[in-house]
Each structure stands twice: as C-alpha cells, then as structure tokens.
Image (cartoon, helix red, strand yellow):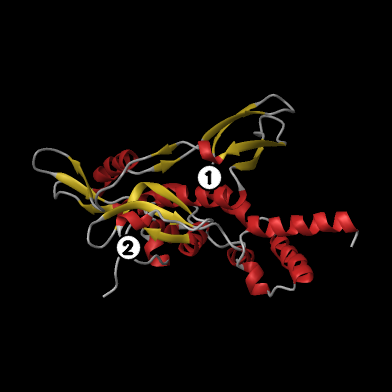
C-alpha cells in the first residue's frame, strides 16, 4: 500500500523549494480539499522545453506542463501530473505561475505597455513587484457550488479550471467563449429555468466564489502624458518572461561545459540562479587571471 505523507511532513522542503498556500484549493476525488503546495523553480530542462514550443502553443497548455514539472506536492496527494494540474482552479494556476516566476527570476517583472492610439502610440515600461500583486483568497471546500434561487430551487455549478482554459484556447469570439465556459460549468438548473436565464446568475456566482489574481495598472506616458489604465494578463506576462531568449540557456550550457566539462544533462538540471552563480565565478576568475 502506498503511504501518504503526514501533514507535518508536508512543508519540509529542499533548499531550492518553497511552500505556498493556494488562494482557492484543490479538491481531490474523495472530496478532500488541499491548499498547501511545494514548488520547485524552473531548471534548464524546463527552459529548454519552453524554447522548443511552437509560438502558437496556447498559454493554458504551457501553464499545465510547467506546473506539472514544478509542483512537488499538493497537500497529501501522493503524486501530481498534468491531468491533476488541468483540474486545478484558474486562479490557483495563475497564482502558482507568478510564484514560479518569482522563485526562478526574482520578484521584479518589467512590462512594456503601449500608449493608446488616442495618445502617441509609443511604448512605455513599468516594473511590477510580484510579491505585492493582490490575491483574492476564496478557499474552497468542494467542487460543486450552489446558487439559491428560493427555498426549493437552486442552480449547481463548478468553478473554471485549467481544462476549461485549454478547451477554449484560440476562441476569437469573446461572448461565445464566455457562453461555452458557462455551459461547461453549469452542473444543474431547476426545470423552470432556462439556460439563458441561469447563465448570468452563474457568471456572477463564479465571480464571487473563485479565487482571483488580477491587477489593473494606471500609467502616464512619459512622451505625451496620456494616462493609460489597463488590466494585465499576469499569467501570460510571467510565461513570456520565463521563456525569455531561447539562446540564453544554450549559452549557459556552452560556458559551463567549456569551463567545467560537465555533461549537458547535469547543467540543464540546474536552476537559472545556480547556473548564474557558476558563470559569475568563471567571469571573476577570468578577470583576475586573464585566462
């Protein structure tokens, strides 16, 4: 029989790992809710995976694979795979991607915004502190939620997951995508209620029940003074930054293999921070000796 980790063992992490509490939580097949997660930063193998992806790969699918590679444990669930990550709530997945970016490359994220067409249209840069992004925590206790209509009738629904995001990826009609998402999330409606009547009620109920990782920024263009207010897609920004320049990882592999004669597989097993420490030492040695 496979033994499950004890609660007191859960938060024991290796030096490079960190423990976090999900803003919502994962409910397993037996109905038990888990919120504690142990996360490992990206390694060179993960960065090489990102570099290998076609440009059109949906970000939801990339989030699934990265989290499946990086999550070491969720609560007392014995193993984490891509199928489990797809069943996680959207807000929890976005939260973990931000934490993964923070662990891997630090808490500052530089973002380029575009001044509105009624301004000058030029680019402007801002810096975000990932450790101060507002998180709306809404701990869940089950997979099915209810919206009470009266003493006798209620609507049953679930919250959107990564699987929903992957299924709806590429939809260009926003209204149609929202309608399809609600169709997927509505579990049951009373006979007297039509879907068209239930949909807006469920949409509002999801907004009140789901954990959220949202950020709206206001920035003044340094060129024309136009004030821009926009909501940021934080998960997409974090993914784009984690992907970075595909050539960077192979440059690091070349430098470390050339100087230390390590095999590629061992270099790719290192995190970016660990690789950078060794490369800094190589640079300092070269500056000291000239060779």
Q: Residue furthest top?
A: 225
Q: Residue at x 57, y 53 (%)?
A: 239
Residue 173 visible at all: no
Q: Residue at x 56, y 32 (%)?
A: 217
Q: Residue at x 82, y 58 (%)?
A: 285
**Would you place residue 155 above or below residue 279 in this image?**
above
Which image quarter: residue 28? bottom left
Residue nearer the viewer, 38 or 286:
286
Q: Is residue 57 left or right of residue 152?
A: right
Of the numbered discs 1 and 2, the one sitting upstream in the chain is: 2
Q: Is residue 131 left or right of residue 281?
A: left
Q: Position of residue 146 (x, y in %)?
A: 20, 45
Mark 1 to mark 2: distance in Å?
33 Å
Q: Position of residue 181 (x, y in %)?
A: 36, 52
The N terminus sits in image quarter? bottom left
Residue 251 visible at all: yes
The C terminus sits in image quarter? bottom right
Q: Mark 2 highlights which residue?
A: 5
Q: Residue at x 24, y 45 (%)?
A: 198
Q: Mark 1 highlights which residue?
A: 234
């Amino acid at each position: 029989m496979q033994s499950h980790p004890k609660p007191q063992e859960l938060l024991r992490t290796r030096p490079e790992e960190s423990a976090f509490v999900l803003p919502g939580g994962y409910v397993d097949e037996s109905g038990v809710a888990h919120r504690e997660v142990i996360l490992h930063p990206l390694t060179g193998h993960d960065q090489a995976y990102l570099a290998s992806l076609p440009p059109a790969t949906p970000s939801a699918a990339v989030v699934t694979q990265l989290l499946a590679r990086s999550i070491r444990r969720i609560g007392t669930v014995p193993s984490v795979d891509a199928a489990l990550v797809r069943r996680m709530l959207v807000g929890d997945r976005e939260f973990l991607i931000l934490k993964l970016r923070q662990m891997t490359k630090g808490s500052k994220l530089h973002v380029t915004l575009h001044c509105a067409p009624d301004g000058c249209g030029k680019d402007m840069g801002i810096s975000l502190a990932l450790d101060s992004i507002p998180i709306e925590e809404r701990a869940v206790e089950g997979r099915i939620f209810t919206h009470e209509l009266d003493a006798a009738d209620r609507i049953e629904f679930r919250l959107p997951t990564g699987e929903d995001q992957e299924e709806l990826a590429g939809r260009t009609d926003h209204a149609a995508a929202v309608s399809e998402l609600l169709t997927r999330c509505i579990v049951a409606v009373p006979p007297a209620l039509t879907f068209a009547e239930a949909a807006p009620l469920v949409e509002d109920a999801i907004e009140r029940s789901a954990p959220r990782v949202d950020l709206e920024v206001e920035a003044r263009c340094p060129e024309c003074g136009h004030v821009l207010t926009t909501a940021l897609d934080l998960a997409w920004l974090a993914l784009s930054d984690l992907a970075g320049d595909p050539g960077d990882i192979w440059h690091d592999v070349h430098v470390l293999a050339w100087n230390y004669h390590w095999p590629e597989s061992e270099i790719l097993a290192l995190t970016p921070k660990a690789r950078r420490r060794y490369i800094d030492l190589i640079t300092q040695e070269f500056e000291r000796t000239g060779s």
